[in-house]
Amino acid sequence: MAEPDAAEGMPAIEGAVAAFLDNLQTVRRLSPNTVAAYRTDLAHFAEFLKRAGIDDLASVDHRTLRSFLANQQTRGYARSSVARRSASIRAFFHYLTETGALTSDPSTTLSFPVKGRKLPRFLTEQETEALFSAPDEGSLLTLRDQAIIELLYATGMRVGELCGLRLGDVDLEAGVIRVIGKGDRERTVLAGVPAVRALGDYLERSRPELARVKGYRGDALFLGARGAPIDPRQVRRVINREARALVGGEGVSPHALRHSFATHLLASGADLRSVQELLGHRNVATTQIYTHLTGAEIREAYDRSHPHA
C-alpha cells in the first residue's frame, strides 16, 4: 500500500494527497474518472487549507472540515458536489490514519446528507418499445446503433463498459458477454434474443466494413464511422439522437437505458441481489435506488411471482 510521500520540498498536504491518489489508482484500482473526481475534491480542500494558513494535516480538526464544507456551500456549489467532497475527505483521512500518517481521524463523524436525491431518467415499457421499433435502414451505422441500443438495454452495462468490449468477450451462441467494470471487476451479463440478433447483424454486415475504412485490425467490438474504436461521447450522441426522434423529443442518456433495465427487471419480480449482480454493484444499497415502483406495480409483480399470492 502506498504511503504519504515525505520527500524534501513537497508540502505535507500535497504529498499526502499524491500518495492517496496513487493508492486509489494502483491498489484499489479505481477508474480514472473516479480518481480524477477525488483529485478535484481534494484540490478544493487543499486550497481552503492554504487560505486558512494550515500547512499541517495534523492540525486539521472536525471544525476545520465543517468550515470547509460550509465554505463550499457559500461559494455556490451544488449540494451533491459538497456531499461528494465530504465523502472524499472521509476517504482521504481514513487512508491517512490507516497508513499511520495520522494518529486520529477528524472526519469520523463528518456527514453532509443530500435531501431529495433525483433518480435518473428511465423509459417506460411503452417508450422502450417505441425506441426499438425504429425502421431498419440497413446502413452500416444504423446496424451498429441498433446493436448498441439493444445491448445497453438488454444487459444494463455502463457506457464505458460497452466501449471497452472486445470481440472475444462476446459469446453469441450462449447469449453471454464478459464485462470489465469499475475497479477492473469482471462479471458476466446476459443478452436476450433481440440483442443477440442485432449484435450478430452488426458483426456480420457492419463491423467488417467499418474496420476497412482505415484498415483497423484491433479487436474493439464497436467502431465509429471513421473505423476507430467508438468512445462514450459518440455512444451518448447515438442514444440521444435516436431517443429524440422516437420518444417524444426528450433526450435520453445511455445511463437511462441501464436504469430502465434495472427498473423493468424489478417491476417484473426479479430479486434485488440478482439485479445487483447483473449491474455490477459492489453494494446492494446502490441497487436500491432502482426500487422506485408504485404500489400497483409491486402488487402486480407479487401476484405474478409468489406461489401463494
Image: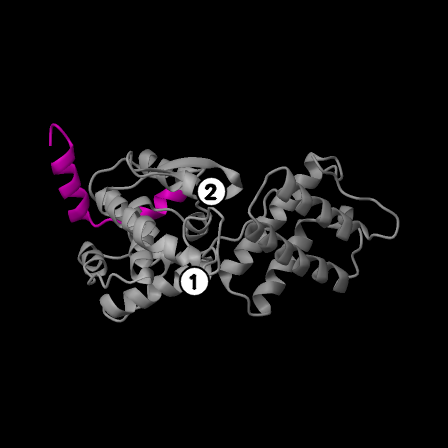
Q: In which quarter of the image is the C terminus?
A: top left
Asked if 170 appears above or below 212 in the picture, the reply is above
**Mark 1: amino acid:** Gln
Tell me if residue 246 is in the magenta stretch: no
Residue 210 in the image, given as x and y percentages of width and height: 40, 58
Tell me if residue 304 is in the magenta stretch: yes
Q: Mark 2 points at which residue?
A: 181
Q: Residue 260 carries which label?
A: none
Element under disc 2: loop
Which circle's residue, 1 or 2, is located before the other in the chain? 2
Which image quadrant is residue 128 in? bottom left
User: Can residue 106 be seen here?
Assistant: no
Asked if 195 appears above or below 243 in the picture, the reply is above
**Mark 2: amino acid:** Gly
In front of the other: 102 or 62: 102
Looking at the image, residue 226 sits to the left or right of residue 107; the answer is left
Asked if 61 appears above or below 233 in the picture, the reply is above
Looking at the image, residue 190 sits to the left or right of residue 73; the answer is left
Tell me which residue sits at (72%, 44%) in the image. Answer: 19
Residue 262 in the image, given as x and y percentages of width and height: 30, 46
